Image (cartoon, rainbow, N blue to C red):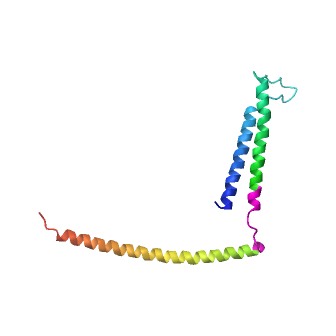
């Protein structure tokens, strides 16, 4: 797999981890009193077990996010360094575009030749089938 595909997969992993982390925190966070004007939030039925689980989840999820981010950074550092700056890159792009145009014209010519050959074969097939039908004697 090329480096760009690896970067895309790693970025998808980071987005997935972030999404799941936020969703889990949103789902499992204990209620908190917003201001003195609001009543105290209701206490949960089993606060010790939920509190212990909630305290561990952010640590585990943040560790997974940090690990994924470090892997992403390692992939980015493995990217080849462009040589010559922006002008050299633009020149290379222009060269590749010119090469692409030449190959495109060549392919277009081959396509036209193939279409002509197909028409010719279809005409021959039509003539052959007409000849076969004409040779058959009626019953």
Give the answer, above or below, for where 29 lies relative to 108. above
Q: How many labels does the image show?
A: 0
Give the answer, above or below, for where 41 lies relative to 11. above
Task: Report x, y in % for residue 130.
Answer: 24, 70
Q: Residue at x 77, y 75 (%)?
A: 84
Work out whether residue 55 or residue 111 is closer to the camera in this orientation and state it: 55
Q: What stretch is highlighted in magenta?
A: 73-86
Task: Report x, y in % for residue 78.
Answer: 74, 62
Work out whether residue 135 or residue 83 is closer to the camera in this orientation and state it: 83
3 left or right of 113 in image? right
Which quarter of the figure has residue 50?
top right
Task: Report x, y in % for residue 83.
Answer: 76, 73
Give the answer, above or below, for where 45 lies relative to 70. above
Q: Quadrant of the C terminus?
A: bottom left
Q: Is residue 42 magenta?
A: no
Q: Residue at x 68, y 57 (%)?
A: 6
Which quarter of the figure has residue 34?
top right
Residue 101, can we see it?
A: yes
Residue found at the far right of this picture = 36
Which quarter of the figure has residue 85?
bottom right
Residue 30, can we see it?
A: no
Task: Report x, y in % for residue 61.
Answer: 76, 41
127 left or right of 71 in image? left
Q: In which quarter of the image is the N terminus?
A: bottom right
Residue found at the far left of this picture = 139
Work out whether residue 97 or residue 47 is closer to the camera in this orientation and state it: 47
Q: Residue at x 75, y 75 (%)?
A: 87
Q: Is residue 84 magenta?
A: yes
């Amino acid at each position: 797999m090329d480096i760009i595909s690896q970067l895309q997969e790693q970025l998808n992993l980071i987005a997935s981890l972030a999404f799941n982390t936020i969703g889990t925190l949103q789902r499992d966070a204990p209620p908190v009193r917003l201001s003195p004007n609001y009543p105290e939030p209701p206490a949960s039925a089993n606060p010790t077990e939920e509190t212990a689980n909630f305290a561990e989840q952010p640590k585990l999820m943040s560790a997974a996010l940090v690990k994924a981010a470090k892997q992403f950074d390692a992939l980015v550092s493995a990217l080849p360094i462009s040589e010559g700056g922006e002008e050299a890159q633009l020149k290379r792009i222009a060269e590749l575009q010119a090469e692409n145009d030449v190959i495109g014209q060549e392919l277009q010519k081959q396509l036209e030749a193939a279409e002509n050959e197909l028409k010719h074969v279809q005409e021959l097939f039509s003539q052959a089938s007409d000849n076969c039908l004409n040779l058959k004697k009626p019953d």
